[in-house]
Amino acid sequence: MSVKPAAPSASFSGPFALGTLAAPDQAPFPGLVVPEGRVLDLRTALRDRALTIRRLLERWDEVLPRLGALAANGTGVGTGVSAGSQTDADADTADAWQPLDGLRVHAPVEPRQVFQSGANYRQHVIDLELAHRAPDDPRTPEAARAEIAEVMDRRAAEDLPYVFIGLPSAITGPYDDVVLPTWAEQPDWELELAVVVGRPAYRVSVSEALAHVAGYTIANDLTDRATVFRRDMKAIGTDWLRSKNAPGFTPLGPWIVPAASIADPGDLRVTLKLNGDTMQDESTKDMLFGVARLVSYASQTSRLLPGDLVLTGSPAGNGMHWGRLLRDGDVMDGSITGLGAQRTRCIAQAAS
């Protein structure tokens, strides 16, 4: 049985957010969520029975003003959308809103591609480097920390982001159980700000990158630390397939909050609690490479598509830092300023 709040929280910045929800025993639907805790089925409101959040993002520039008008109609308050943009169809949705309470919240979008950033928080990388120091390292901890910090500052000024590819099949909902595979010896949490692409991006500059961002959501990019590096041939390097892409290893959501509602993605608080104890509590100010830099960098090689995710890395406070990895029964509560909160419980995979 999943650990879920009595009702999914509609706590987020701005007049509305987007989610994928489902009534009991019903198919998921794309929803417009307002802070009052109500949701509108956008298949009905936009007269498209095949609509999904990803399909909506493919029309992001066109549909964004309409979403604002629908939210204003559903709450009775202004959203900055002019009255002339509201239509009779918007008015017809007044009785179509339903309470969020009782609906299941799925991952807000099914991306085609997931771009993941590693080693992107200064303090997190310093902590990991210290944790993996060789036993015969002659440096004192203080000297090692100072040297690593200098390398991080040089990276931010002169180097490139570190980005790799994740699998959409690892994504699960923000309140779903996370199954810990029997082979995962050191499963760890990594709460992250996730960027949701709204306009195709290929070879865009840093100054252009944010114009291609539709919004933001929360991702917990779980990692089995024991399988990050290949044991059979160290020269191969990292094994992200094995360590990060088990089914359900990326709880996502609950909501996509439009970029216009987030004043500064470089100044958000990322907080993860394990069984009620705070483990991660850091600002995105500690990122070495900000959102625009990451999106631009990924687009130099790959064509980013609407609905794709760019995960921005995880701050300090992972399990390796605390000497405490995930185990059966653990409950993770993750939140990011303005984006809501997720809650997931860890379940040990039954031995076959």
Image (cartoon, rainbow, N blue to C red):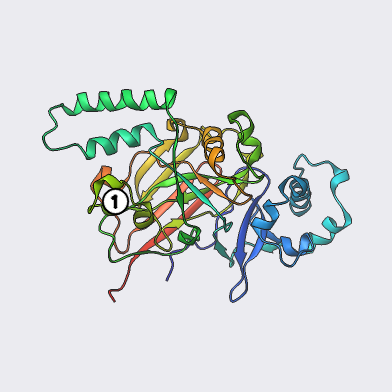
To which quarter of the image does residue 39 belong? bottom right
- How packed mark 1 is, by other alpha carbons closer than 10 Å (few <14, some 14-19, many 20 or more), is some
210 lies left or right of 239: right
Rendered residue at 36%/51% (across/down): 189
Which residue is label 1 attached to?
Answer: 225
Nearest to the observer: residue 5 or residue 84: 84
Nearest to the observer: residue 146 or residue 175: 146
Residue 97 to residue 302: above or below: below
Tally the marks.
1
133 lies left or right of 148: left
Nearest to the observer: residue 215 or residue 234: 234
| Amino acid at the residue labelled 1 | Arg
**Which part of the image, by quadrant, shows the N terminus?**
bottom left
Rendered residue at 43%/23% (across/down): 158
316 lies left or right of 94: left
Rendered residue at 25%/27% (across/down): 145
Residue 281 on image: x %, y %? 39, 39
Residue 212 on image: x %, y %? 64, 40
On the question of residue 38 being in view, the answer is no
**Which part of the image, by quadrant, shows the C terminus?**
bottom left
